[in-house]
Image (spheres, coloured by chain):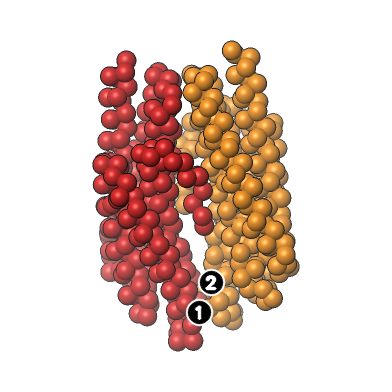
Chain colours: A red, B orange
Amino acid sequence: MREVFQQELKEVRERLVEIASLVEASIENATRAFGESDVKLAEKVISDDNKIDELTVSLDELAINILARQQPVARDLRIVVSALRISASLERMGDMSEHIAQLARYRFPEKVVPKPLREIFGEMGKLDVEVAKKLTILLKTEDVKVAEQIRADDDRMDQLHQSVFDKVLGDSWKGGAEDTVDATLASRYHERFADHAVSIAKKVQYLATGDWQVPNTPQN
Amino acid sequence: MREVFQQELKEVRERLVEIASLVEASIENATRAFGESDVKLAEKVISDDNKIDELTVSLDELAINILARQQPVARDLRIVVSALRISASLERMGDMSEHIAQLARYRFPEKVVPKPLREIFGEMGKLDVEVAKKLTILLKTEDVKVAEQIRADDDRMDQLHQSVFDKVLGDSWKGGAEDTVDATLASRYHERFADHAVSIAKKVQYLATGDWQVPNTPQN
């Protein structure tokens, strides 16, 4: 029984890694579509998100199934419950990629990002891709050092998010309302993407260290 | 054992109702603070959110504890897992109230909402309060008709969300970048609040009818 259970936990983890890899591809494509106004790529991100949703639902079913059949306790139980939460966060990360792609599609053939913000959004996009890559590694290795790196990346993301508002609300901003709306939403989506990654990183850290960090509460 | 379990499920439900009542108070205060630029009330919403966070964490602990001790299966298991998810959504609804209050505090003593949008945001605020009230009733009664009403309210919210953008991107919009940023964020927070309520409503419907509606996937 125990061996079957370990095998099933392994499958849960592999599926989380699989979903995280899809999220990684999705944010990579979304930020490229966003930066380059590539409407085809944006559409790909939007349609690929269904796959992430389906895999999430099916992972949740597996986890509930394991709870029913194996009736895990203590640490094993927390692993399965955490998997349910991690899956919910990954699903939301996929949604953020999709939203970023939708902005690109919506403004096509115009660029979503007006010139004065391109550098900041370029960095935000790279950082989100970086965070997604680290997240996949974290779920594969459960290396808490990687979790720390994700939290540091998120701090940088918060600075970038703030700097978007500084630009948009500064005297030199010449953008119209459309530019302002797009910048506001895009910045929020980028920032939420990283937040969800931090929320997952905290859960993995908790599992590795037993140090419960109110993981249900991303502070923003 | 079965009787103890039923008692515990009752407690889980009572705690969800308690948290939902706090969320109800929080959105009621937040939207009033937002409409009336009441900075004291905004600060109350922000500090009260800690209470929601704490109750959520403690409910999650109770649910995990029940899983460990009672090892429920089938429908009982799904009830406990759903409670974990509902609690996560309630926690996020509290965050949305807090964000709305933060906007009010941030712009004080100015009003957050410029004149041409006051009517729309007035309706959005009322609708979110309405949704929160219905949610508390839904969690108390598990009446699926109430779940349907919440979904209908959310459809109306989506229309209002769209109408904010129509205004802001229309020719008659005279707001500066700050107004545009505030309107964009506030509209998003109001709309997400209702989305989370729908996500909870779907879970309650599912529990009542057994009809699984991909409840992990709010589509936006």
Horizontal placement of A204 versus B147: left or right? left
Numbered tag placed on residue A169 in the rendering? 1
Write the residue at 30% across / 50% down: A145
**Tag 2 subunit:** B
Residue A215 location in percent, x, y? 47, 44
Chain for numbered disc 1: A
Q: Residue at x 57, y 31 (%)?
A: B62
Residue B173: x %, y % from top left: 58, 78
Q: Amino acid at mark 2?
A: Val
Q: Image quadrant of residue A128?
A: bottom left
Indicate the quadrant where residue A43 lies: bottom left
The residue nearer to you, when weighing A106 against A189, is A189
Q: Amino acid at mark 1?
A: Leu
Question: What residue does disc 2 label?
Answer: B181
Residue B85: give its label. Answer: none
| Mark 1 surroundings: few (<14), some (14-19) or many (≥20) residues within 10 A | some
**Circle 1 sits in a helix, a strand or a loop, which is it?**
loop
Is residue A92 in view from this perspective? no
Label 2's element? helix
Is A112 left or right of B34, judged from the image as shown? left
**Residue reaching furthest to the bottom:** A172
Q: Nearer the viewer, residue A80 or A45?
A: A80
Q: Residues within 10 Å of mark 2 (few under 14, many from 20)?
A: many
Q: Nearer the viewer, residue A158 or B198?
A: A158
For the image, the number of numbered tags is 2
Q: Please state if A177 lies on the left or on the right of B108 as rendered.
A: left
Residues under numbered marks 1 and 2 in contact, where contact means CB atoms less than 8 Å apart: yes
User: Where's residue A11, x and y in %?
Assistant: 28, 30
